Image: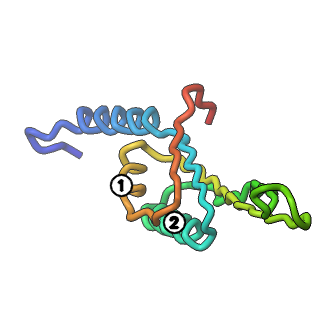
Amino acid sequence: VIDPPGSDKMATLANKGKKGVETQEKVARIRITLSSCKMKALEKVCSLLINRSKQRNLSFSGPVRLPTKVLRITTRKSPCGEGTNTWDRYQMRIHKRVIDLHSPSEVVRQITSINIEPGVEVEITIPENQAL
């Protein structure tokens, strides 16, 4: 089989090898931590992130549900301290979810460019020492 003039088969094979190496170097393990007091809003953002990563055929794990933190404050109702001992009990629940993505950071920027519900905090971390 003779290649037509001007086609450089070896150069294209060499370029393909370089592109493959570059994409492997850029693949990063990215951890997205979501926290909120409103569980419905948190689950909605989680499902949006998971659906977007499924559309792009990315490997991911999660959402991992972390234990809920319950912050409690108990205080006396009476401002002066006299009268019957009645107490007010207040609590705030903080829900957390963790999603791990294995993809290039450029793709993660596209995935995370969604409308995030108010009250949901998003923290994205890329560990420096990556062991895949």
Q: In the rendered view, does 60 fall on the left or right side of 83?
A: left
Secondary structure beneath label 1: helix
Tell me where residue 111 appears, x and y as whole percent.
41, 57
Which dot marks residue 120?
A: none
Circle 2 residue = 45
The image's colouring method is rainbow
Q: Earlier in the sequence, mark 2 or mark 1?
A: 2
Quarter of the image that includes the C terminus:
top right
**Residue at 23% from the left image edge and 33% from the top image edge:** 11
Q: Residues within 10 Å of mark 1 (few under 14, many from 20)?
A: few
The image shows residue 35, relative to residue 52, as above or below, that is: above
Distance of mark 2 from mark 1, alpha carbons?
15 Å
Secondary structure beneath label 2: helix
The image shows residue 71, relative to residue 125, as above or below, that is: below
Residue closer to the observer: 27 or 87? 87
**Residue at 63% from the left image edge and 69% from the top image edge:** 39
**Residue at 12% from the left image edge and 44% from the top image edge:** 4
Q: In the rendered view, does 50 fall on the left or right side of 75?
A: left
Residue closer to the observer: 18 or 83? 83
Q: In the rendered view, does 50 fall on the left or right side of 97?
A: left
Tell me where residue 23 appears, x and y as whole percent.
40, 39
Tell me where residue 28 appears, x and y as whole percent.
50, 39
Kind of residue sitting beneath label 1: Gln
**Residue at 8% from the left image edge and 40% from the top image edge:** 5
Circle 1 residue = 110
Q: In the rendered view, does 104 fall on the left or right side of 88?
A: left
Kind of residue sitting beneath label 2: Val
Q: Residues within 10 Å of mark 2 (few under 14, many from 20)?
A: some
**Quadrant in which residue 20 is drawn:** top left
